[in-house]
Amino acid sequence: MASASPQNVISVSAACVARVSGLLVALVVTLGAIPAQADQLVFGSFKAADNASNWAKKLSQLFAREIEVSPVTRDGTTLYRVHSRALDPAQMEQLRRRATAAGIEHWRLLQTDSAPVEAVAAEPTPPAAPRTPPRNEPQLGAPRLTPPSPVTETAPTGAVDDSPAASGGTRQSEWDLGLQTRTFAEEGVFGQDRFEGSISLEFEYFHGWDDDRQSVTVTPFVRVDSADSERTHGDLRELFYSRVGDNWDLHVGARRVFWGVTEFQHRVDIINQTDLVENIDMEDKLGQPMAQLTLVRDWGILDVYALLGHRERTFPGTDGRVRLPWRILDDDATYASGAEETRVDGAIRWSHHMGPFEVGLHHFSGTSREPLLVPELVGGEVVLRPHYPVIDQTGIDAQAFYGDWVFKLEGYTRSGFGDRHVAFNVGFERTLVGVFGTRADFGIVGEYLYDERDEEAVDTLFEHDIALGGRLHLNDFADTQALLGVIFDTEYDEYFVSLEASRRLTDTWQLALEGRVFAGGKDLRTTTPFGTLVQPEYKSAWLQADDYLQLELKKFL
Amino acid sequence: MTVDAADSPASLGRAVFEEADRRASDYRDLEVSLRMILRTANGRATERALRIRQLEVPDDADKVLVVFDTPANIRGTALLSHGHRFSPDDQWLFLPALKRTKKIASRNKSGPFLGSEFSFEDLSAPALEKYAYRHLRDETLGEVECFVVERVSTEDFSGYTREVFWIDKREFRTQRVEYYDRRDTPLKRLEVSDYALYEEAFWKPRRMVMTNLRSHKSTELIWQDYTFGLGFTAERDFSVSSLRRAR
């Protein structure tokens, strides 16, 4: 992978696509035939056979389709069910629409083969929990079924059914368009503009078949930025095939997986690489090619991952903001592993919940997601070259619930960055429902962020920091919410303020606001550029001019 | 189970709920689509769409999965609830932007659901064991003869001090509910209508209207396309890992 250009980023993704889609084709081919669907639509049931056959005759004329009557025995009573013949999903959808439009109540009887209706009605498919013995007639009240007319009491609503057909499979597609502006409080330290505008587009397509037991999900993403050529980039967030078994799932392809419980920093979340150029909150991630097997058992959920290759972290370019003073060779990293970015990494996570406790344990062995940034001279220019060590990380994420309090812990012990070290986040969240006599919820979050390496923790800004936040959710029509957080360093004066707020403008437009303030850090002019690399109190010095306000208008199509 | 008018108010109240529960039981699993129409006091309306899947669990309360379709900014969000008879229910929320599954405190179910007048508590069918019951009186609602039964949560997580149910004597269907706040004044009223019989056994409502008696806002719920016997299983369709792929 050579120089840093948007085309290059996209071609990296394309390489992953090729790798994954090869696997996909192989898998899909081996997965065999799809069982035929043959469901029926039922238009009510009658105690009197005559009433049923009259109703069936009427419906046959109305729909110009054969409508049949079958006896069904339930609770010792024989009823005459009026129903269609077995229908394929398209016919089913058509008949349901017509029935709804005509105001005729109906429900669907599911079958997985085209067995006669009587057999199915007596013992519906598929066999699951055993039926309990027939009920006794209640002592109070009339017999269960009295009406000689179809057993609906009032006219249906007449609404048109536009829900996806459950039989066969689901198709869903969605476009998310984002129009974003970032306005910085000051011009950048390197003369970067105060204003940055960008457009992003994400498309998500889901195609399921075999009752969604098998599916393909595709989510490409692209952003075009006015100022930073590195931020003009694309990624295949997802392209994976899923197979769902009775108590297991298999996913193969590029996906996104989240681990963790704390709010301010996601310390154990390691499966995906951070798309840092998107947002410094580290919550945007690059698609990670993988094969993931999930087992669901009485003793918990076990996820086993083979991570097929490594993605390099993205960084802002020289015209971008919120960056270090040196150019980062983010497409030309060095690796501790001889296999470089093609190393296959492994991860395993077990999680379980027991009463008020929830716990996850994990182990990751492979190339680190955080690089070391190593200064070197290239043609007289100081540049930073990312170096990715191989690490072993064993960690925990856990929560305990007590009333409206949640106590949280996530942390790990990790080797590969010097000596094995411990890092964790610990904290609480408390949600108050209906605060100040309103319908709003207010959540309070407090966390302590700790890294044993202290000042030598070069891959994180949070080594001994306290974080406090408040989350307000108005629960109004517009879904208005705001999250205000402050993280402050316990040893130096630096602190970081973040505000995120959003509200819906219409059903498909949303306005989101984001503000970041970096304060209390040392003044750049009191040291040399190299000094900022080695003196921990200067860790955030380069960000002090980068306070910004971001507005984003989102359209969901 | 029989319902005998000679019983004490407490045992008669419980018997009415037990009979209603018995009649709603053995459905095994279901899926239903909902349209939720939110109205302000002056009639401004906005709409949401969601789907609910439910699974009966032998000897435990139901498992419920709610998938949100619109408004578009919350599309793909899903809520999973594992009901329990003798301990607090478990609830998880799946946030699609982060692919994050977040377990949430039971307390959260008493807040407004999707900005509507319903709370999640109002929509779920909690275990019988979690309430104390009292038969208040009999009353005719329109032409429907009803038992009027009060229910008080024995957990700390309910948003109400008590709920009063009107349940018809013929089929044991809830016709009306009034919810009382801490000052014991009526906060909301739910009217349930358009019942239809499904699978020759289960009366299900197709229309609910919840009115806030203070703000006069209301939320209408249209339940449509009930489907039964989908063959859901706890592991495949209602596990915490299945929440990540809920559609």
Image: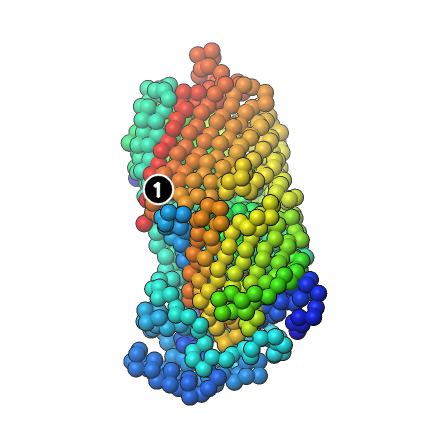
| Residue at image location 62% in from the left, 57% down from the top | B151
Q: Position of residue A328 (x, y in %)?
A: 40, 28
Judged left or right of residue B94, residue B156 is right
Q: Position of residue A374 (x, y in %)?
A: 47, 26
Q: Position of residue A400 (x, y in %)?
A: 64, 44
**B87 or B23, nearer to the observer:** B23
| Residue at image location 38% in from the left, 28% down from the top | A549
| Residue at image location 42% in from the left, 85% down from the top | A51
Q: Position of residue A345 (x, y in %)?
A: 52, 46
Give SS at disc 1.
loop
Residue A518 drawn above or below residue B160: above
Q: Residue furthest toward the top?
A: A526
Q: Residue tagged by mark 1?
A: A505
Residue B176 drawn above or below residue A139: above
Chain of the residue displaying label 1: A
Residue A97 drawn above or below residue B163: below
Query: Would you say residue A27 is visible in this rendering?
Result: no
Judged left or right of residue A76, residue A243 is left
Q: Looking at the rendering, which quadrant does residue A398 occupy?
A: top right
Q: Quadrant of the N terminus of chain A?
A: top left
Bin the neighbour count of mark 1 within 10 Å (Cα to Cα): few under 14, some 14-19, many 20 and up: some
Q: Looking at the rendering, which quadrant does residue A56 occupy?
A: bottom left
